[in-house]
Amino acid sequence: DIVMTQSPDSLAVSLGERATINCKSSQSVLYSSNNYLAWYQQKPRQPPKLLIHWASTRESGVPDRFSGSGSGTDFTLTISSLQAEDVAVYYCHQYYKTPYTFGQGTKLEIK
Amino acid sequence: EVQLLESGGGFVQPGGSLRLSCAASGFTFSNYAMNWVRQAPGKGLEWVSAITGSGGSTYYADSVRGRFTISRDDSESILYLQMNSLRAEDTAVYHCAKVRATVTNYYMDVWGKGTTVTVSS
């Protein structure tokens, strides 16, 4: 199984500041120039919402302060200027091969 | 608007069975793979099962293989998860999620709100 490890487990950032969440996979999720890696945002009592797919492609309607980067086994989700509505848990997810797996989640709060 | 609405959750004793349903609307259901993903109370996301757009291929997490069966009725746009031999560790909110492709190794773009399964004596 591909193990997804996120860091940190929790993060407190001031409004307007940058937030960075890391995700490392136990094996490469890169195939044919595509990284099979997505990022989701989950707010309390809501289902996950797709933010980023193919590691760096922002989903339609997602604010451009959200960006994804990385390749192979190391990935990053960056929120360039934290807004109050960004408080949530963020998950990375590999869809390269079954069993599809998620990181343990990173809880983002306002400092 | 794409919508997914799960139902069928409830309280069941260990060893019991439940069938979850996910009613889809707003898209051509048969063209897309679908997943079930669960979330135990206070925990993270765990992929459970996937089915291709054709229904020809199904996949399971080791934790549920042999006990759960995923299926779909494309004529009614409904996804199912038959859960047998339920255990306490199956207690979770179960979400269905649409995949943005016919094959399953693609990202999930729309999620339902989930239905709660509680397994307890």
Image (cartoon, helix red, strand yellow):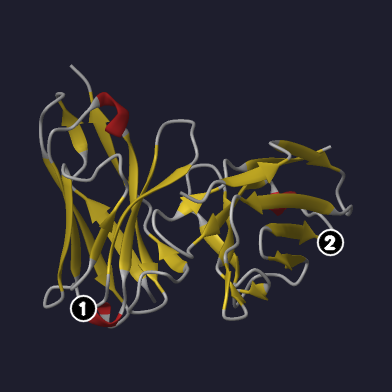
Q: Secondary structure at mark 2?
A: loop
Q: Is residue B45 above or below residue A98?
A: above
- List x then y, in percent, for residue B121: 17, 16
- List x then y, in percent, for residue A102: 52, 49
Outermost residue, front side? A27
The circle drawn on residue A80 is: 2
Residue at the image point whose x is 19% and y is 72% from the top: B55
In 3D space, how far apart are the residues under numbered discs 1 and 2 (Cα atoms)? Answer: 40 Å
Residue at which label 1 appears = B54
- Circle 2: is it few (<14), some (14-19), or many (20+) Cα within 10 Å? some
Q: Nearer the viewer, mark 1 or mark 2?
A: 1
Q: Nearer the viewer, residue B80 or B7?
A: B80
Question: Disc 1 residue type?
Answer: Ser
Give left or right: position of A80 versus A97: right
- List x then y, in percent, for residue B32: 31, 77
Outermost residue, top side? B121
Question: Disc 2 residue type?
Answer: Ser
Q: Are marks 1 and 2 in contact (CB under 8 Å)?
A: no
To which quarter of the image does residue A18 belong?
Answer: bottom right
Quarter of the image for the C terminus of chain A: give it: top right
Give left or right: position of B89 versus A87: left
Q: Is residue A62 above or below residue A20?
A: below
Q: Nearer the viewer, residue A4 or B29?
A: A4
Please state the chain letter of the residue tagged with numbered disc 2 in the rendered image: A
Please state the chain letter of the residue tagged with numbered disc 1 in the rendered image: B
Q: Is residue A91 above or below residue B32?
A: above
Residue at the image point whose x is 30% and y is 39% from the top: B63
Q: Is residue B8 above or below residue B88?
A: below
Residue at the image point whose x is 84% and y is 61% from the top: A80
Give left or right: position of A88 versus B56: right
Residue at the image point whose x is 89% and y is 52% from the top: A17
